[in-house]
Image: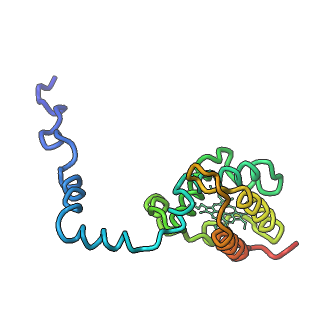
Amino acid sequence: MTTEPDTHPQATGAGGPPPGDDRENDSFSAGLNLKGSLREAMSAPPTVYEIVGGQRFFDDLVDRFYDAVEEDPLLRPMYPRDMGPSRRRLAGFLAQYWGGPPHYSEERGHPRLRMRHFPFAIGQAERDAWMAHMTASLDAATIVDGTGRPLPAEIRAAMFDHFDNAATHLINQPSA
Ligand code: HEM
């Protein structure tokens, strides 16, 4: 039998993470830098992300889209059984693309969308089905600011073009 206290927690492990992180955040709101970035923030045009109402807009857009994908016999088999994480990834990607916080990249790294779609056989039919569901979701979209206003036409057109071009770019199978 041993009496050595080798199962005791090490003193260095007590007390949690070093205090550096929080302090760094606090120091961000001090001095001339704040004036500079405040001035910049006040004169910068709002991002699409801000205009449409932030993350909630993209969550709603993707929820309508994936609800339709879940019922689509051509597309559904490509996706995992639990589509919760898929919803979160696409909504995070789109929010970041349109000027929101970089949560997608923090979690997933560089999008590398073509590479990430290689495991799925995407021909013209799959691309068109994907676009049909996304177009329907865009058509139903409203700004998330409590007014329920429809999406401004120029923002809808820019989003449509992005989806349309990206979806074509992701085709990796010759048409049947
Ligand atoms: C052309 C038709 C398309 C098909 C059939 C398709 C299918 C898929 C599938 C099966 C997945 C894996 C589901 C998951 O676990 O997340 C996926 C992931 C994803 N797709 Fe698509 N997709 C298409 C177009 C697009 C387009 C146009 C975009 C962007 C504008 C896009 C963005 C993404 C993103 C961000 C992910 C998650 C990537 C990751 O971080 O793993 N997809 N897609």
Residue 130 screen position, x and y as percent:
75, 62
Quarter of the image with the N terminus is top left
Q: Tell me the quadrant of ligand 1.
A: bottom right
How many marks are shown on the rendered structure? Answer: 0
| Residue at the (72%, 57%) spot, across then down | 137
Quarter of the image with the C terminus is bottom right
| Residue at the (11%, 30%) spot, across then down | 4
| Residue at the (15%, 39%) spot, across then down | 10
Q: In this view, does 81 lie above or below 108?
A: above
Snapshot quadrant of residue 114: bottom right
Q: Nearer the viewer, residue 70 or 176?
A: 70
**In-image side of 135 versus 117 (left or right):** right
Residue 151 screen position, x and y as percent:
65, 62
**In-image side of 79 versus 20 (left or right):** right
Q: Is residue 11 above or below residue 22?
A: above
Residue 80 screen position, x and y as percent:
67, 50
